[in-house]
Image (cartoon, helix red, strand yellow):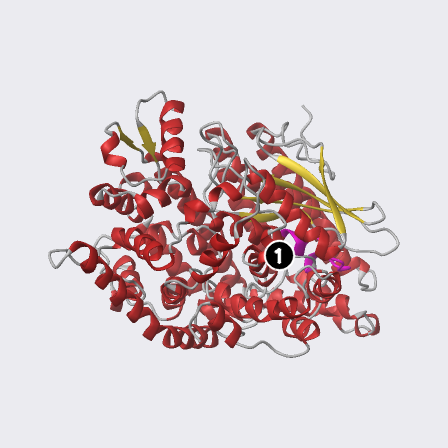
């Protein structure tokens, strides 16, 4: 039987890959990669770049490519059979990478090469790759004793199993919830678009009435607009108590993951897991990341408390002295009412101006104007009929990259939004090869015979993920392992977050925001309302992100179960200091916090990266604002100094090359209305 995972070229046959292919392909590719690694380690030939680092990159490429496809399909088109195959193979692949980092012969080969004249004469990118590879070996246990290497490998395998189970539990718990309402009076307050979506959702399940789920396009309108506080509470509690009981209880997983990460850090000689994670990032040490978050919290605290007093006062004003204190499920609801009252602005007014097709066209038009490229649809095999593929071409017609777009929620697809690279090509000017990637989201699907009409936040999300994609697609790095988005995680969000700024600029919006029926642009009056309302409860938005970063760092720096007790209660106490209301005793957001528990590392001890990169993006965008947000000269500078460079230089140096100086904090505070 032909196995499509065995010889993956540029055109990936997504429509042919089945669960039955996974284990045989992984078995064969693991064996092939291991044989190639053994050959490198055992070679007695004089050490060169080609037979050490170059050979190692080549040895693992096919395995990496196949696993990226399997990982992706498990995220967007999972089945029971695929999940079983994935769960059976993922720990073995994790074990391979763990063993690779502790392979004495391989490490010896790298160190031997590092001592040669050839190594000392390497070009800068290849020299950086050698240095970082040696650092990675050390950070992954190459210098441990055999006994400790065994311990570390066991930790890595268990972390892979546990974090995979965590992610699958969250998906299953999310899909397990539904709320079916048959009394129309119970959905008073909902926008018509949300009502139509809920009615179509119910009809798709063969039910009467309106069906609501915990997927963002369904849940967010309920919490923001639904008048019935009891239903808002039911949905909020369901979302924030996912995966805390029965067979899908993530609480023991969280405790064990934290224990394993702590043990891993200690084994490798670090004070805690945050120091291990940040050493290779811009922050360098966990205490610097914490100090950064603490500083921003102090700068935001006064405005945060004022905003919350004002919201409670607003509720008293409209409901009288008998109104109770705000509960967590009230905040979005009364915030939206207050915002409408203060700014005469309703998010729903913008929806007709953001039909999905127009947003994508405008997203591509923005990139085309900035980076002098062409983006065209292409034929390609896909994993779902709704998925589309596109090519990015340079002005001379050369294909630089291709990508896939998957935007609507499905029950076989995980929530959220993300970008993945499928093929990162090492750049050689004489024969440049194209990159391949994708971005996914879960935006509002078409309802009521209308096109998919997005919220402004969903528009920002698409621009964000496309920014990651461009970072991948514009890479011109001669080493695959340093290409594209393979950069420090507190730098990787700069190219994505900076793209969100175009969704707020008049000239940026005019590239894509047009009424789906009349083709009219966003009226000036509505645009001005939107801009005035941008900083509404800006301190609360900032504190929410700081809370996630703070609890992440606290769990990986100072949490001690013997002293601090249950991780859920500990996390709730940390998050309480960043919450507009009192959190219930059973608040269990942590059990669904995929950013830090759905991957052996992921954003663990690194959630601060979002705010860190936000400082960079707010500051860097000041150059675009000054010189023109679609000025191709600025676009060319950003592409050449940052997007094309990958991890070929230190991120501080790349930022300095673009801005001519280091980053400033003030633009972020000004943008958030906190200066």
Residue 249 sits above or below residue 308 on the image: above
> Was residue 357 drawn as part of the magenta stretch in this picture?
no
Considering every residue shown, the one lying at the far right of the view is 430
The front one of 591 and 536 is 536
Considering every residue shown, the one lying at the far bottom of the view is 661
Magenta segment range? 469-482
Q: Is residue 442 visible?
A: no
Judged from the image, the secondary structure of the residue bearing numbered disc 1 is helix
Q: Quadrant of residue 520?
A: top right
Residue 44 drawn at (x, y percent): 80, 60
The front one of 440 and 585 is 440
Q: Callout 1 environment at 10 Å: few (<14), some (14 to 19), or many (20+)? A: few
The front one of 118 and 381 is 381
User: Residue shown at 34%/51% (left/top)?
Assistant: 591
- In the picture, measured across the screen, residue 513 lies left or right of residue 629, that is left
Q: Is residue 505 visible?
A: yes
Residue 320 sits above or below residue 216 on the image: below
> Was residue 473 drawn as part of the magenta stretch in this picture?
yes
Quarter of the figure with the C terminus: bottom left
Quarter of the figure with the N terminus: top right
User: Residue shown at 56%/42% (left/top)?
Assistant: 71
Residue 569 drawn at (x, y percent): 25, 60
Residue 490 sits above or below residue 76 on the image: below
Residue at which label 1 appears: 507
Residue 602 drawn at (x, y percent): 50, 56
- In the picture, measured across the screen, residue 639 lies left or right of residue 189, that is right
Q: Quadrant of residue 407?
A: top right
- In the picture, measured across the screen, residue 265 lies left or right of residue 40, that is left
Considering every residue shown, the one lying at the far top of the view is 206
Considering every residue shown, the one lying at the far left of the view is 322
Residue 386 drawn at (x, y percent): 57, 31
Q: Quadrant of residue 356?
A: top right
């Amino acid at each position: 039987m032909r196995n499509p995972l065995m010889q993956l070229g540029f055109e990936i046959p997504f429509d042919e890959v089945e669960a039955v292919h996974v284990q045989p392909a992984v078995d064969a590719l693991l064996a092939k990669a291991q044989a190639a690694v053994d050959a490198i380690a055992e070679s007695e030939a004089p050490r060169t770049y080609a037979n050490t680092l170059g050979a190692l990159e080549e040895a693992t490429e096919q395995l990496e490519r196949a696993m990226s496809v399997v990982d992706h399909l498990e995220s967007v088109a999972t089945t029971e059979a695929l999940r079983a195959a994935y769960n059976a193979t993922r720990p073995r692949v994790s074990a391979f990478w763990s063993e690779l980092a502790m392979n004495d012969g391989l490490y010896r080969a790298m160190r031997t090469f590092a001592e040669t004249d050839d190594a000392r004469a390497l070009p800068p990118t290849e020299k950086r790759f050698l240095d970082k590879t040696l650092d990675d070996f050390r950070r992954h246990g190459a210098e441990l004793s055999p006994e400790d290497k065994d311990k570390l490998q066991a930790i890595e395998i268990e972390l892979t199993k546990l974090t995979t189970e965590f992610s699958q539990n969250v998906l299953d718990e999310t899909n397990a919830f539904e709320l079916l309402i048959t009394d129309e009076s119970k959905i008073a307050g909902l926008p018509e678009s949300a009502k139509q979506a809920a009615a179509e959702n119910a009809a798709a399940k063969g039910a009467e009435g309106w069906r609501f789920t915990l997927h963002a396009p369904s849940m967010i309108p309920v919490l923001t607009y639904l008048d019935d506080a009891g239903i808002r509470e039911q949905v909020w509690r369901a979302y924030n108590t996912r995966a805390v009981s029965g067979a899908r209880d993530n609480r023991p997983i969280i405790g064990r993951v934290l224990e394993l990460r702590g043990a891993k850090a200690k084994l490798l000689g670090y004070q805690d897991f945050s120091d291990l994670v940040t050493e290779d990032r811009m922050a360098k040490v966990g205490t610097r990341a914490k100090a950064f978050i603490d500083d921003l919290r102090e700068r935001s605290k006064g405005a945060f408390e004022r905003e919350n007093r004002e919201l409670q006062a607003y509720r008293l004003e409209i409901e009288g002295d008998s109104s109770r204190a705000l509960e967590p499920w009230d905040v979005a609801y009364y915030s939206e009412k207050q915002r409408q009252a203060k700014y005469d602005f309703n998010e729903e007014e913008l929806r007709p101006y953001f039909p999905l097709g127009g947003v994508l066209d405008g997203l591509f038009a923005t990139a085309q104007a900035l980076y002098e490229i062409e983006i065209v649809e292409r034929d390609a095999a896909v994993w779902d009929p709704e998925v589309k593929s596109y090519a990015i071409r340079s002005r001379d017609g050369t294909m630089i990259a291709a990508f896939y777009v998957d935007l609507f929620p499905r029950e076989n697809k995980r929530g959220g939004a993300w970008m993945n690279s499928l093929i990162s090509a090492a750049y050689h000017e004489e024969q440049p090869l194209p990159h391949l990637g994708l971005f996914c989201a879960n935006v509002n699907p078409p309802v009521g015979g209308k096109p998919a009409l997005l919220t402004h936040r969903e528009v920002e999300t698409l621009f964000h993920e496309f920014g990651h994609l461009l970072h991948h697609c514009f890479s011109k790095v001669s080493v695959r392992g340093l290409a594209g988005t393979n950069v420090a995680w507190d730098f990787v969000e700069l190219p994505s977050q900076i793209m969100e700024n175009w969704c707020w600029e008049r000239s940026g919006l005019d590239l894509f925001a047009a009424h789906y029926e009349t083709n009219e642009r966003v009226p000036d009056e509505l645009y001005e309302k939107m801009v005035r309302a941008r900083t509404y409860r800006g301190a609360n938005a900032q504190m929410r992100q700081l809370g996630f970063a703070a609890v992440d760092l606290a769990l990986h720096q100072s949490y001690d179960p013997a002293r601090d007790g249950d991780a859920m209660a500990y996390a709730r106490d940390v998050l309480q200091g960043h919450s507009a209301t009192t959190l219930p005793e059973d608040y269990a957001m942590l059990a669904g916090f995929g950013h830090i528990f759905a991957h052996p590392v992921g954003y663990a001890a690194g959630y601060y990266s979002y705010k860190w990169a936000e400082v960079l993006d707010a500051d860097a965008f000041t150059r675009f604002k000054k010189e023109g947000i679609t000025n191709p000269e600025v676009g060319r500078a950003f592409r050449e100094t940052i997007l094309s460079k990958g991890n070929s230089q230190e991120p501080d140096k790349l930022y300095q090359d673009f801005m001519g100086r280091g980053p400033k904090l003030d633009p972020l505070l000004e943008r958030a209305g906190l200066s």
